[in-house]
Image: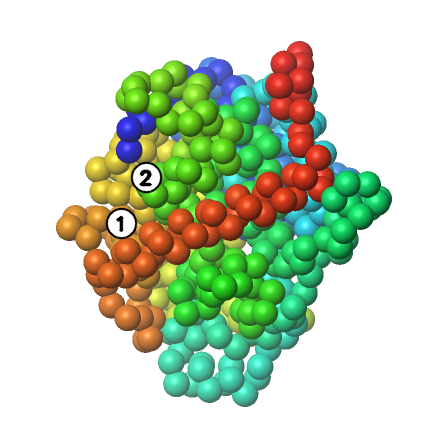
Amino acid sequence: MDVEPHVLEEKTTVTVLVTGANSGLGFAICCRLIDEFLFTRPQSQTLHLLYSTRDAKKGEDTLKRLNAHLQNTLRRANGKAAVGISLLLEARIKLEGVLVDLTKLLTVKTLAKQLLARGQHLDAVVWNAGVAGWTGINWLKAAWEILTRFSQATTYPHFMGCDVGALTKRQVGGYGNVHMFPEPRLGQVFCANVFGHYMLTHWLSPLMDGESRVVWISSLSATPDLFNLEDIQAIEAEMAYESSKRLTDLLVMTAELPSTQTYTRPFFNQPPARATSTKPESARAPQMYITHPGVVATSIADLDTFLAFGMIAFMYIARWIGSPWHPITPYKGAVSAAFAVLAPPSQLFDLEAREGKGKWGSAADVFGDERVVRTEIEGWGFGGDLGSPVPSGSIASKRSEYRGPATKESREEFEEAGRRCWREMEELRVEWEKRLGRVEIDACASADV
């Protein structure tokens, strides 16, 4: 990496945007950010936490629950310190809801225009919102997998049914210009999990610089056997959710490689590369990081109460027999995302500069004590450098069908796949900007805050 460390500690206000915050992991990430910010950042700093929901009612409910969590945190602080400390801590948290539906690109554009009009610098964004696209469980397959390979089945389940071919609704009405032609197909899971965030990153890039962090939420189940380069939108895929997460891994891990710069520079609204090796910090691209929560119990699977209880029971059994990947509760699973947002440069930026770009995951021991670990990515390894030693504290894949450590050939295939994905994503972005209309970046960015 040729970017100097970014130092969040020096800022007065740290602004973070988290999508999909109304429940599950997204809500837990917000709670964890509040807690860790209050007790690890200087008293002079304020956290401005922007959380997104799909409608105003969910936004109001999320605000109530976040405030309740904040009050619980303040009560615990009062029990450990002088009475009244909560008054000082409470003033350091500012909560604000925003609206966006990642399957409706016009709402993505509206949010981008709203934030650009403020001109407020974004220190970090956490792209968490998404949909699973599951329709149910293949019970025969589930029973067989659990009986024959319990640990793998409870970590990398392959028995969820998918709504194959699900598309988003029409994005743009009207009959002028490109609108008169049929819209290209847009996969529902792909749009919610990847493309909506991709467009939002592009449009919000004027509010970010080389100190900003773009944190994508991936998954343990993002394996190459579930991804098809000929169908990156996973429209025909039987496991579209897992495919979308593998696509996320490919994009983030290869974003800083020379082979993808032709595509990443226009994506981040950067000028073409110049001969000089130095450039103003404001012209540097934000740093993209990837995390996963391990295996956590959320409502994304949409199970009834009895099945949800059974799922959680299996998770605990998996952890007790030695699986490192079962934090189980969303709050514990959020530790890796909070780390990617708040970790000082020496623990994140500098480490990746030394050991290569990697995937940060949430793990837990048999007692449920959570921690952040480097996670192996098939084809990439731990840091993309096959000659480097395995980073301390890393955990290798334990999938029964895992093909082994990354090789020179698999590393080359991974980079080529990433380059091709960047090319196709940029082609899609340009196509959809023609239909949606560009965000007036200069006009918005120059507006008064």
- Report the colour scheme: rainbow
Question: Considering only vertical position in the picture, is 164 above or below 22?
Answer: below
- Residue at the location (40% across, 51% down)? 418
Q: Is residue 176 visible?
A: yes
Horizontal arrangement in the rendering, residue 410 relative to residue 307 (left or right): left
Report the residue marked by disc 2: 258
Q: Amino acid at mark 2?
A: Pro
Label for residue 384? Answer: 1
Discs 2, 1 touching: Cβ within 8 Å: no
Question: Considering only vertical position in the picture, is 90 above or below 175?
Answer: above
Question: Considering only vertical position in the picture, is 185 above or below 211?
Answer: below
The mark closer to the camera, 2 or 1, is 2
- Residue at the location (62% across, 52% down)? 192
Label 1 SS: loop
Q: Amino acid at mark 1?
A: Gly
Is residue 272 or residue 425 the one in the foreground?
272
Is residue 414 or residue 221 the one in the foreground?
414
Label 2 SS: helix
Q: CA distance from mark 2 to mark 1?
A: 14 Å
- Quadrant occupied by the C terminus: top right
Looking at the picture, how far across and down is residue 397, in whole percent? 31, 64
Looking at the picture, how far across and down is residue 90, in whole percent? 58, 24
